[in-house]
Image (cartoon, helix red, strand yellow):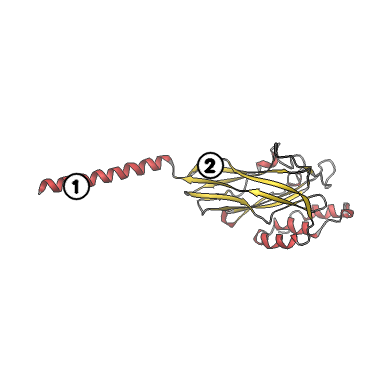
Amino acid sequence: MGCWWMTELNDRWLNQSKRGWSESFLSRVCIMDYKSVFLPCLLIAQLWATPAEAAIILSVAPSASTFNIGDSGFIDVMIHSDSADALDSYLIGLNLTGGPGVVFSSPQSEAFLSDGNYVFFGRSSSVINGFPATTVGGGGSNVTVGDLTEDPMSPPNPLPFVLPGASSPSLLTRLEFDVVGAGSFSVHIDPSSTFSDVDFNDFSFSSTGGSFTAVPEPASVVFLGIGTVGVGLLRRRRRLKNASSE
């Protein structure tokens, strides 16, 4: 399957060639279709990108700090800027570490696209064109998320969104996961992720990761405790019986 944004990009190229869009954007959006080469291609793409001056700040927030085995949860990535950055497209990678005890759900529901606080709400090209915005890889240990703006009244023209400040961050994505084993886990934004303006200049960004733990079901812990006590009582009874028979 070819790059699923290519048709729209061709339309944009024909209608807005004067913007001088960079080849790097074509590389970045095609990465969504070729997940296996996400990081190498993105690093190559960045060689052609011109960095914008302002900075974007991201934060990763799990829905809880502790989960039981069998639970489902989600991770919110919030975004704001230290200046009035007009964001037109993004492509990010999220990596989950800590072992196979937690996996990103596949496929993702992508319900965040219809959330009123979503950064591209009402102007999401993924929604307008019915494109998937997420790709789960690495056996559930990583997710790629990408979207770009589109004016619903004048497609495929872009409609950049001015990012809010720290007091009212927007939702960049919400990703669901399933807990299948115990452990300590962390999630972080891949440093090769990109955020671009309408001319496909890349904004610099910083991010803080999130962490959480997964523990056995409370009932399992109780039964384990009962079993341990039972074994102890049985051993004591045997010792008493042996002592009395002597």
On the question of residue 3 being in view, the answer is no
Which numbered mark, 2 or 1, is in the foreground of this view? Answer: 2
Residue 61 is situated, as x and y percent measured from the top left of the image, at: 60, 43
User: Residue lying furthest left in this view?
Assistant: 246
Taking depth in this image into account, of 192 and 140 the one nearest to the observer is 192
Residue on which the image places disc 2? 65
Identify the residue at image location x=68%, y=63%: 40
Label 1 residue SS:
helix
On the question of residue 188 being in view, the answer is yes
Q: Is residue 11 above or below residue 78?
A: below
Question: 10 Å neighbourhood of mark 2: few (<14), some, or many (≥20)?
Answer: few
Placement of the N terminus among the 4 image quadrants: bottom right
Identify the residue at image location x=54%, y=43%: 72
Residue 73, quarter of the rendered image: top right
Would residue 24 be found to the left or right of residue 190 on screen? right
Taking depth in this image into account, of 77 and 9 the one nearest to the observer is 77
Residue 232 is situated, as x and y percent measured from the top left of the image, at: 26, 45
Label 2 residue SS:
loop
Compute the Cα span from label 2 to label 1: 44 Å
Question: 10 Å neighbourhood of mark 1: few (<14), some, or many (≥20)?
Answer: few
Residue 131 is situated, as x and y percent measured from the top left of the image, at: 72, 49
Taking depth in this image into account, of 153 and 54 the one nearest to the observer is 54
Amino acid at circle 2: Ser
Numbered tag placed on residue 238 in the rendering: 1
Amino acid at circle 1: Arg
